[in-house]
Every structure is written in structure tokens, then in C-alpha cells.
Image (cartoon, rainbow, N blue to C red):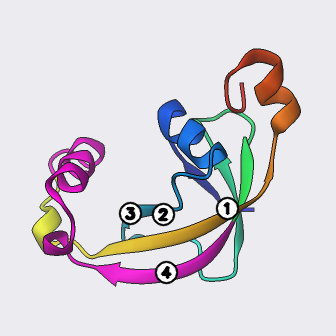
């Protein structure tokens, strides 16, 4: 099963249902529409399973300043204007609720 890594803060947003998409640089190994992936905070156990509902090309100009800044932090040194980007839309299927409730840390 493929995985997508998120920060702990974003994991909280995913579990709360407030985050339903991510922007990634096009690279081999990204999931495709309909695929189920594990959502992780680093190399920890998955905190949720996500079904990828859509995979769409998106341009840097289509993103607001906050999203562009976040991408620049995650991909330092990349020429994001010349790099193909994808918008992955997802829906959580199952959360690792027991572990999250036990220690307040997704997947921890």
C-alpha cells in the first residue's frame, strides 16, 4: 500500500475532516484515482486510510499565497513554476482512533 506523509498538524485537520486535498510535485509513485493509501506522520504507523477521489494537474498560479509558501517550504530549491503539480483529493476511510485517543498523537 502506498502512503502519503503529512505533518502532525495536518493529520489533526484530516482526522477532523477539515483537510481533504494535498498538492504534490509530480513524481513516480504517487497514487491514482480510486486508490487507497495510508496517511502517515513520518515513518510512524498510519493514522488513517484515505481513498483518492481525484488526481488533477494544477498550476502554481492557481494556488493562493499561503499554499505557494507551504509548497516552497516542502520542496526547497525546486523551481515550482516549472515543475508539474498535482492536486490529490481524498476522503478518509478509517482512522486509527484507538491509538490517537490513547496518546493524542496521530499514528504515535
Q: Closer to the camera, 21 or 39?
A: 21
Q: Quick one: label 2 or label 1, which is nearer the N terminus?
A: 1
Residue 25 screen position, x and y as percent: 34, 65
Q: Which residue is mark 1?
A: 2
Residue to which mark 4 is pinned: 55
Give the residue at x 12% y 61%. Answer: 79
Q: Which of the 4 image quadrants contains residue 40?
A: top right
Q: Position of residue 35 (x, y in %)?
A: 70, 76
Instruction: Find out whether the residues at labels 4 and 1 contact each other: C-beta distance under 8 Å.
Output: no
Tell me the residue at 48%/63% (across/down).
21
- The residue mark sitting in front, 4 or 1, is 4
Write the start and end of the magenta stretch as one range.
Answer: 51-77
Residue 93, quarter of the rendered image = bottom right
Mark 3, residue position: 24
Distance between the alpha carbons at the discs numbered 2 and 3: 10 Å
The residue sitting at 40% across, 72% down in the picture is: 87
10 Å crowding of disc 3: few (<14), some (14-19), many (20+): some
Q: Along the polypeptide, which appears first: circle 3 or circle 1?
A: 1
Of the image marks 4 and 1, the number of the one nearer the N terminus: 1
Horizontal side, residue 60 vs residue 92: left or right: left
Instruction: Say whether residue 61 is left or right of residue 14.
Output: left
Return the residue at label 2. 21
In this view, the mark in front (2 or 3): 2
Asked whether residue 44 is in view, the answer is: yes
Mark 4 to mark 1 CA distance (whole Å): 15 Å
Residue 46, numbered label: none
Dot 4: what SS?
Answer: strand
- The secondary structure type at the circle numbered 1 is loop
Q: Residues within 10 Å of mark 4 (few under 14, many from 20)?
A: some
For the N terminus, the quadrant is: bottom right
Amino acid at each position: 500500500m502506498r502512503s502519503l506523509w503529512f505533518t502532525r498538524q495536518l493529520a489533526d485537520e484530516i482526522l477532523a475532516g477539515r483537510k481533504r486535498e494535498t498538492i504534490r510535485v509530480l513524481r513516480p509513485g504517487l497514487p491514482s484515482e480510486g486508490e487507497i493509501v495510508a496517511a502517515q506522520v513520518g515513518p510512524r504507523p498510519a493514522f488513517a486510510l484515505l481513498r483518492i477521489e481525484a488526481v488533477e494537474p494544477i498550476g502554481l498560479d492557481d494556488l493562493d499565497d499561503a499554499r505557494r509558501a507551504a509548497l516552497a517550504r516542502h520542496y526547497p530549491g525546486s523551481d515550482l513554476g516549472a515543475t508539474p503539480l498535482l492536486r490529490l483529493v481524498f476522503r478518509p476511510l478509517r482512522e486509527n482512533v484507538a491509538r490517537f485517543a490513547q496518546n493524542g498523537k496521530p499514528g504515535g
